[in-house]
Image (spheres, grey):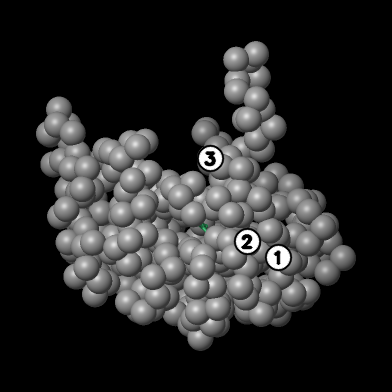
């Protein structure tokens, strides 16, 4: 740290992204990326857009918003696009977190970082012992509520009825549902936005659309909340989504069949992986995402992470009293998961 950093940031605990190793060739199961590249049309579209990079991108992202609006059956005024969903999450904490931000003790690690960054008092709500979320803990909080559904790193979901119960009982606060993994399981809350002016749904192209490197996310809500988020966007970075990414996103939305097949395959490989691990004595939470959260009774999670890494397989370990026993494993290709399962079993039974 230099002596110039503003005091209000000196104690900031920044988010630590999963490793993106350069060089050594790992089986990379640590950041929930898709194991499949986007279809060729997506890269072609991005390359075509690259020919006009002398021009600024469309700050209103009109074409992509229109296509997305059609697909989601909402209006264009109900959508804001962002530079990855992390950006619109940041905007939401900035815009709606003044009265505090409530979220689970075991959830996406970026929420507490955004809360600190914007000085939103954090209200940490512990999940139950089995990592499920109790909706009654979220009644009338009077502050921004942030729930990942499916949750990370657990992969567990809450039902649409439970979401509506929480949204309805917090009329004075924004309820943000982060649906980064919704294409792998669970019911989307998007149909509820017509009914509730305090519901904000956030999504990303990073996981189920194989576009983590393109950085494209979005939020859906009634127009009032979207206007608020746009106020923040135009006060920070009006051209927040670059033109290659807009083109890639547009092409991706036209490739419904490709992604339906890819995601179906990921779900099938996930379910087979869970079955094999359980058959070998691992405990695995029921996953609705493109990753699993698993532990082997009596075996240290950090040790499992380290041994897998030495064997060339990168997974994620989250230290801490509730998560330290576990590893989070992204679902890769079938051949990669086969190697992972065999290696994990041989490590814990050695
Ligand atoms: C991956 C992830 C995101 C962020 O994705 P972007 O790449 O920034 O779009 C947001 N929320 C959760 C829960 C995630 O796991």
State the SS at label 3.
Answer: loop
Q: Which residue is mark 3?
A: 20
Q: Is mark 3 within 8 Å of ligand 1?
A: no
**Mark toward the start of the polypeptide (3 vs 2):** 3
Circle nearer the viewer, 3 or 1: 1
Residue that sits furthest to the front in the current view: 172
Q: Position of residue 145 (x, y in %)?
A: 56, 64
Q: Which mark is residue 155?
A: none
- For label 1, the crowd category at 10 Å Cα-Cα, with few meaning under 14, some 14 to 19 and many 20 or more, is some
Give the quarter of the figure containing the N terminus: top right
From where the camera sits, is residue 218 visible? yes
**How many numbered badges does the structure rendering display?**
3
Q: Which residue is mark 1?
A: 125
**Mark toward the start of the polypeptide (1 vs 2):** 2
Is the Cβ of the residue at disc 1 closer than 8 Å to that at disc 2? Answer: yes
Give the quarter of the figure containing the C terminus: bottom right
Alpha-carbon span between mark 3 and mark 1: 31 Å
Q: Which residue is mark 2?
A: 102
State the SS at label 2.
Answer: strand
From where the camera sits, is residue 216 visible? no
- Residue 144 lies in what quarter of the image? bottom right
Depth order, front residue of 245/168: 168
Q: Position of residue 238 (x, y in %)?
A: 28, 38
Q: Is residue 269 left or right of residue 328?
A: left
**Mark toward the start of the polypeptide (3 vs 1):** 3
Residue at 22%, 68% (x, y): give it.
75
Q: Position of residue 309 (x, y in %)?
A: 67, 46
- Residue 256 lies in what quarter of the image? bottom left
- For label 3, the crowd category at 10 Å Cα-Cα, with few meaning under 14, some 14 to 19 and many 20 or more, is few
Q: Is residue 5 left or right of residue 90?
A: right
């Amino acid at each position: 740290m230099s002596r110039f950093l503003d005091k209000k940031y000196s104690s900031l605990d920044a988010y630590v992204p999963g490793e993106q190793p350069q060089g050594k060739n790992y089986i990379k199961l640590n950041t929930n990326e898709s194991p499949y590249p986007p279809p060729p049309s997506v890269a072609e579209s991005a390359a075509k857009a690259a020919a006009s990079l002398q021009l600024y991108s469309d700050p209103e992202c009109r074409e992509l918003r229109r296509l997305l609006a059609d697909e989601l059956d909402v209006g264009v005024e109900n959508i804001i696009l962002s530079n990855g969903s992390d950006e619109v999450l940041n905007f939401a904490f900035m815009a709606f977190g003044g009265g505090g931000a409530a979220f689970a003790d075991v959830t996406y690690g970026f929420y507490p970082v955004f809360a600190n960054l914007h000085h939103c008092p954090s209200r940490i709500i512990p999940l139950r012992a089995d990592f499920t979320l109790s909706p009654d803990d979220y009644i009338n909080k009077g502050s921004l509520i942030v729930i990942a559904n499916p949750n990370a790193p657990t992969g567990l979901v809450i039902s649409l009825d439970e979401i509506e119960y929480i949204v309805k009982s917090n009329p004075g606060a924004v309820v943000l549902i982060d649906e980064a993994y919704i294409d792998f399981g669970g019911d989307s809350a998007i149909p509820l936005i017509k009914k509730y002016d305090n519901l904000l749904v956030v999504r990303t192209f990073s996981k189920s659309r194989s576009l983590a490197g393109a950085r494209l996310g979005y939020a859906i809500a009634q127009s009032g909340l979207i206007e608020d988020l746009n106020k923040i966007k135009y006060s920070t970075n009006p051209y927040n989504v670059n033109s290659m990414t807009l083109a890639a996103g547009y092409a991706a939305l036209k490739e419904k069949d490709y992604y339906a097949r890819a995601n179906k395959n990921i779900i099938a490989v996930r379910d087979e992986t869970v079955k094999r691990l359980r058959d070998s004595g691992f405990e695995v939470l029921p996953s609705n995402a493109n990753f699993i959260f698993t532990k082997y009774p009596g075996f240290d999670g950090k040790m499992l992470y380290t041994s897998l890494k030495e064997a060339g397989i990168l997974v994620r370990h989250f230290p801490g009293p509730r998560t330290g026993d576990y590893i989070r494993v992204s679902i890769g290709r079938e051949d990669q998961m086969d190697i992972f399962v065999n290696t994990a079993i041989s490590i814990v039974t050695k």
